[in-house]
Image (cartoon, helix red, strand yellow):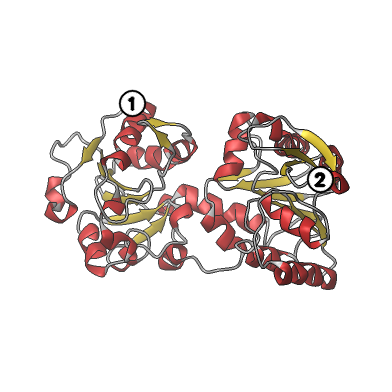
Amino acid sequence: MNNIKDQENLNQKKILLRLDLNVPIKSGIITDQTRIDKILPIINFLLKKQCKIIIISHVGRPKGKVNNDLSLKPICENLEKKINKKIRLIKEDIFNLKKEDLFIDSKEQIVFLENIRFYEQEEKNDLNFSKHLAGFADLFVNDAFSCSHRAHASVSKITDYLPSFAGLQLETEINALKKVTTEIKKPVSFIIGGSKISTKIGIIKNLIPRFDNIIIVGGMANNILSYKGNQIGKSIKEDNCESIIEDIFETSKVHSCTIIYPEDVKVGKNIEDKSQIKELNEITNDDLILDIGPKTINKIKNIIENSKTVLWNGPAGYFENPNFANGSYEIAKKIIEKNKSNLIYSVAGGGDTIAVLNQINAINDFNFVSTAGGAFLEYLEGKELPGIKALN
């Protein structure tokens, strides 16, 4: 995989740059800028090389139709302020555009194409659409690792028509994930949360042979508590997961990997409630499990204390209510404490995990924080990602 930073003579070259700027926007206001901050290095690198940059990205799921609520305009304006340069958002139909239409003013260095998912051809990985996009530029750069598990036109097929390169962020992301998969320092622990265990089974099974501890928290831990014969009240639980859980425990025995799940919990009667600590045998029918309890937190902190590598994907509880955020905060603080002494290599990934880290201003206190959710997990699962395959 060739990286754009190794290319000579990029001066005045037109670069089609695929980014992931799918940030949360409420009433036109960006509520989390992490993904925009992450792409600043590639923008600054290409500007320094005197390139002309054509940015392709998406927001949300417009399903192939124009939706003004999902315009890239607020992102365009946010980036303008960050780099102190004028950026033009091209709203015209992409099919009516030609290469010479993009940089009308010779001083212009960056243009944005409007949300690429306004075109149904994008998600269909349409060849003609890819070819038309390729006609705008001299080179293609993918710096959107978090979109690289999608076989979409601006990620996958585009590489058939242009010399194609990995961006700075994409290479950093893959190197960080290699450190927790193929170049591991043991003991290694994986903290995994989220609501559905069925969507994470592939990752868990793939990591059991290589990891020493897998710590299951969040909604998916309720399935294990229930499987082990505990009452979980009205907590979220996925149906028909018994064989999946049995499989996890059987596989872990074969590979001497310890599976850890909550020993005590914090409950409320609803998600807005105050929290109450309960032992597993104290949970009643109208309880909602919304966080891990102090015994579980101490156990997880002990495991982190004795680990050399930690991977974290998914919060420990319903952190949106501060009464149920303590488990996630304590996990983060323990990892940060070990990181500051250089005693651990830590990678965190996924949108909710980033939201937790942003709440305690800790995004820079991990060795690497991945904005990717799906791509991050599919890479760990050992799947070949279409966007990476296309670059290779």
Instruction: Give the x, y percent position of residue 334.
Output: 77, 37
Q: Report the amino acid beneath label 1.
A: Asn
- Location of mark 2 (residue): 283
Task: Work out whether residue 56 or residue 202 is closer to the camera in this orientation and state it.
Answer: 202
Instruction: Give the x, y percent position of residue 381.
Output: 61, 65
Is residue 251 at least partly visible in the picture?
A: yes
In screen coordinates, is 371 left or right of 328?
Answer: left
Quarter holding the C terminus is: bottom left
In screen coordinates, is 263 left or right of 151?
Answer: right
Total numbered labels placed on residues in the image: 2
Which residue occupies 58% across, 40% down?
354
- Badge 2: residue crowd in 10 Å (few <14, some 14–19, many ≥20): many
Is residue 209 at least partly visible in the picture?
A: no
- Location of mark 1 (residue): 84
- Badge 1: residue crowd in 10 Å (few <14, some 14–19, many ≥20): few
Instruction: Give the x, y percent position of residue 338.
Output: 78, 38
Task: Work out whether residue 277 or residue 329 is closer to the camera in this orientation and state it.
Answer: 277
- Are dots 2 and 1 in contact, CB under 8 Å? no
Q: Report the amino acid beneath label 2.
A: Ile
In screen coordinates, is 361 left or right of 22?
Answer: right
Instruction: Give the x, y percent position of residue 222.
Output: 73, 53
In screen coordinates, is 347 left or right of 383?
Answer: right
Query: Mark 2 and mark 1: span between their CA atoms?
Result: 55 Å
Task: Work out whether residue 268 or residue 146 is closer to the camera in this orientation and state it.
Answer: 268
Which residue occupies 35% across, 31% down?
28
